[in-house]
Image (cartoon, grey):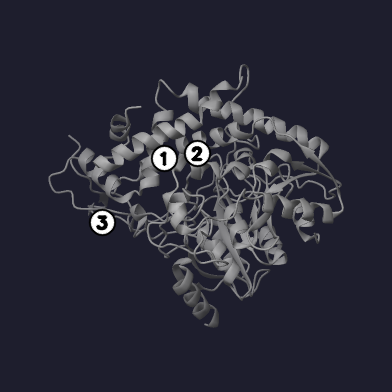
Amino acid sequence: MDVKRIAEISRLKLSEEELRDFSKDVSDVLRAFEDLKRVNTEGVEPSFHVVGIEGEFREDVIEKPLTQSEALSNVKSIRRGYVKSPKLI
Amino acid sequence: MKVIEECKKIDKEYEAFLEIVKIEGSSDGALSGIYFSFKDNICIKGVRTTAGSRILENYNPVFDATVVERIKREGGTIIGKTCMDEFGFGTFGTNCAFKQPKNPIDKTRVPGGSSSGGGVLTRLAHFPHVAVVESTGGSISAPAAFCGVYGLTPTYGRVSRHGLISYSNSMDKIGLMSKDLKLMKKTWDIIKGKDQKDSTSVEGIEKELGVKKIGVISDYMTASDESIRNEVEEHISRLGVKHELIDLKLVHEALSAYYILAVCEASTNLAKYCGLRYGAQGRFGDKTFEDYVTSIRSGNFGKEAKRRIILGSFARTKGHRAEYYLQAAKVRTLIIREFKELFKKYDMLIAPTMPSEPPTLVDAKKMLPAKVYANDLLTCAPNLCGFPMLSKPIGKRFTGLHMICDHFGENKLFEVAKWRG
């Protein structure tokens, strides 16, 4: 696995030490998980919700939402009531 | 005030808390007179909530989690937020960005994780206390066994997760720890049940009481140290109920399936931390969006979080998704089927909670990741399948008796936990 590339797409910049350690750790872990591939799962559906509920909806009732100041209360950079971000392009 | 003073004293010596507060609930209710601590990934309005991570160091929630609301409404008193491994990533409790909780029975050893502080406080508190904690793959059972207290991990979906900071959406469950089963049951009756704010929550129909036949998981017994195995065997024989040894077909595969799904879901959950809306934030300077987000994430996630992001991102890439993620979800189906078949024959399955005694803090920190993950062997399968489980402290020090039931079988767990063994 190209750990550096995977880190980049995950928006992580690794130090040389981290890159060295993770390359070893990750291949050790993936090797330990090889047994998974040997299980015959032909025709088996994957389980995403283990208790088996689906399509749950709540009543379509308007509730009191957070105020704008509450929603922004953890933001450090605010401009005109919006979250400010660094330039995208 | 006496209780808060005691909490401060415990914290000074054992580092169990990330915040100590006192918030009184309603003046009257079923939980009046009981003190509640919350794992630091459960939001309490106005109380710093970090999930044990620097990336959420100054996060101040603007709402209460549903479980907090329900406890306050019934008169429970909140005493603080307990220490945890970063986002729940840890078996031993050695992975919090801020503190290192110590085992309350032997301070040189780990307390178990990831609900480390909850286990430590539960053991040491001399007041009526219930810890509200959370488990993904064993994070309630492991510290309950290592700290010598009761730990309940409920059926997936039975407790609302509104206000819980997610690690792995298909496995996270809010549960409880206590030294007192009665207090635990009282709290359980208040916190369980459907919540409109969590679409994955379920009401469920409680399984009928009556435990007549128990299956003892032989693979988990043989994977455990002899002293632990002996204590569990002795306890089971004293229960005086019919029991048989049973074999599981997919023991090691369950560990692999659990970890693959957990890291995949963790890597998506942690993608939202970008240093703009809450938690760690910095100066933009001349940085582009990409560089800014990368610098915040690289500088504030701990090593294990980064490792899991990389593993999970890899297992979800186009070329590997079917091989890892989907295969793990299919293996999960097979494991659920296997357990469901066993529950047709047995009212409950039993095994040791943890395969060995807690390592020392020094040894645990030197352990390689694959070896640490292997310590979840006994707890990961029921967590992967969302079955309820209760760890009961037995034996001399660190042994837990792990009782596992079919979905919605929590009352059976309480029933057998009361039996003297």
Secondary structure found at label 1? helix
The residue furthest top is A42
The residue mark sitting in front, 2 or 3, is 2
Both labels 2 and 3 in a single chain: no
For label 3, the residue is A76
The answer to whether any part of residue A55 appears in the image is no
Q: Which residue is painted at 78% across and 55% down in the image?
A: B235
Q: Are marks 3 and 1 in contact (CB under 8 Å)?
A: no
Chain letter behind tag 3: A
For label 2, the residue is B262
| Residue B271, image x, y percentages | 37, 40
- Label 1 sits on what residue type? Arg
Q: Which mark is residue B153?
A: none
The residue mark sitting in front, 3 or 1, is 1
Mark 2–mark 1 Cα distance, whole angstroms, equals 9 Å
Mark 3–mark 1 Cα distance, whole angstroms, equals 28 Å
Chain letter behind tag 2: B
How many residues crowd mark 3 within 10 Å: few (<14), some (14–19), many (20+)? some
The answer to whether any part of residue B239 appears in the image is yes
Instruction: Judge whether B256 appears above or below B352 on screen.
Output: above
| Residue B139, image x, y percentages | 55, 51
How many residues crowd mark 1 within 10 Å: few (<14), some (14–19), many (20+)? many
For label 1, the residue is B308
- Label 2 sits on what residue type? Ala
Chain letter behind tag 1: B
Secondary structure found at label 3? loop
Secondary structure found at label 2? helix
Q: Are marks 2 and 1 in contact (CB under 8 Å)?
A: yes
| Quarter-of-image position of residue A48 | top right
